Image (tube, helix red, strand yellow):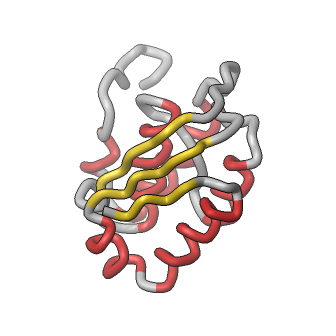
Amino acid sequence: MKLKNEINEKSIWKNFKKNELQGWLVYTLNTCNFDTERENIKIRIDGNEFHNIDSFFCALGEEVNGIAGYFGRNLAALDDCLRGNFGVKSITELTWINHQTSKKLFKAKFKEIVEVFELHKVKVILN
């Protein structure tokens, strides 16, 4: 699809079934262009835009690296991405609106995600 320029808008993954989302994340890892590394970026995600941990990573990837972007597919991969070489040298701030929705959905994983960002000195703002 990407080769034919058919992926030209964000969030096409929202229509995928749960078992298809990991496949999408693998696809984005293998097709995302990481040639340009931006520094000190601020990102914003909305807890109402995703419905499970896999769709969180889909939304995060697009927020950081644009359409069909990748920025992790589990906590270990997120940690790797925050070390650099995945389109970003550093993220200075993450604003997570509607975070309460994510907190209920992810349970203990929510705290772990926040801790990974904080470990890499990302200021996490929960709204």
Image quarter of the N terminus: top left
Q: Is residue 85 left or right of residue 66?
A: right
Q: Residue at the location (62% across, 63% down)?
A: 118
**For residue 53, above or below residue 89:** below
> Splitting the image into 4 quarters, where does residue 62 fall?
top left
Could you say where residue 70 lies in the image, as x and y percent from the top left? 55, 41
Q: Is residue 85 left or right of residue 27?
A: right
Q: Is residue 3 left or right of residue 30?
A: left
> Splitting the image into 4 quarters, where does residue 90 fall?
top right
**For residue 104, above or below residue 3:** below
**For residue 7, above or below residue 5:** below
Tally of numbered discs:
0
Image quarter of the C terminus: bottom left
Could you say where residue 51 lies in the image, as x and y percent from the top left? 30, 65
Q: Nearer the viewer, residue 79 or 16?
A: 79
Q: Residue at the location (29% across, 73% down)?
A: 100
Q: Residue at the location (67% across, 55% down)?
A: 121
Could you say where residue 99 lies in the image, as x and y percent from the top left? 32, 67
Q: Residue at the location (42% across, 84% down)?
A: 107
Q: Nearer the viewer, residue 115 or 27?
A: 115
Could you say where residue 32 lies in the image, as x and y percent from the top left? 58, 30
